[in-house]
Image: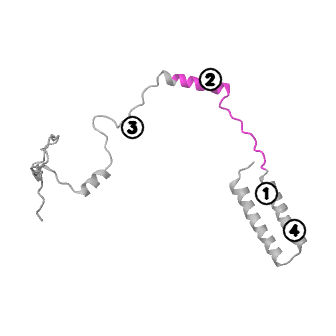
Amino acid sequence: MPEPTDPTPEAPRREIRFKDREFERDNPPVQGLDAVPSFEVRDLLDLANKPLKPPADGPLPSSIAPPASNDVHAILRANLERDRERGLYQVAMEERRPSRRKRDYWTLMIGVNGALILTALLIGLNVMTAVYAFSGVILISIGLTWIMWFIMDDY
């Protein structure tokens, strides 16, 4: 069988290259290793731990006097004095109302646990009712204590 011939001729391959660099360097390249000063890390550590000396031409920035107050500060001071004279900053502390939480906690503890124990005694005291009553007392006591003292706030 004859081989099929390709009717379309192959296109010539394009050559692909990177473009030339089109940017300028801001810093000139270093000419040799002599231009870079050598240093030791210990020297940098010693420089960092030396105390700061004040500059010869003036005081440190922290010792410069603050600027004089302007009109805004004077207005705010006058407003503050007027409010103090009217008594706006005198807060009277109210007496704290006694919390009802402790009373409610003991009422619920005695009531619910007493009801569980009384029910177990009325049904008939055997191993199963004693275990269920004791489990209920433990569960109710732990749950009520957690809710009343750790979750709820004073009321």
Q: Which of pointers 3 and 2 lies earlier in the amino acid sequence?
A: 3
| Residue for badge 2 | 82
Horizontal arrangement in the rendering, residue 153 relative to residue 70 (left or right): right
Magenta part of the chain: 74-99
Please identify, in this view, whether the residue under mark 1 or under mark 2 is nearer the observer: 1
Residue 86 in the image, given as x and y percentages of width and height: 67, 25
Q: Position of residue 149 (x, y in %)?
A: 72, 57
User: Which tag is nearer the camera, tag 4 or tag 3?
Assistant: 4
For mark 2, give the secondary structure: helix
In front: mark 1 or mark 4? 4
Asked if disc 1 and disc 4 are in contact, CB closer than 8 Å, the reply is no
User: What's the distance in space between the residues labelled 1 and 3, CA to CA?
Assistant: 59 Å
Compared to 81, does 135 lie above or below?
Answer: below
What is the C-alpha distance between the residues marked 3 and 2?
Answer: 34 Å
SS under mark 1: helix
Q: Which mark is residue 44?
A: none
The residue located at (12%, 65%) in the rendering is 1
Which numbered disc covers residue 105? 1
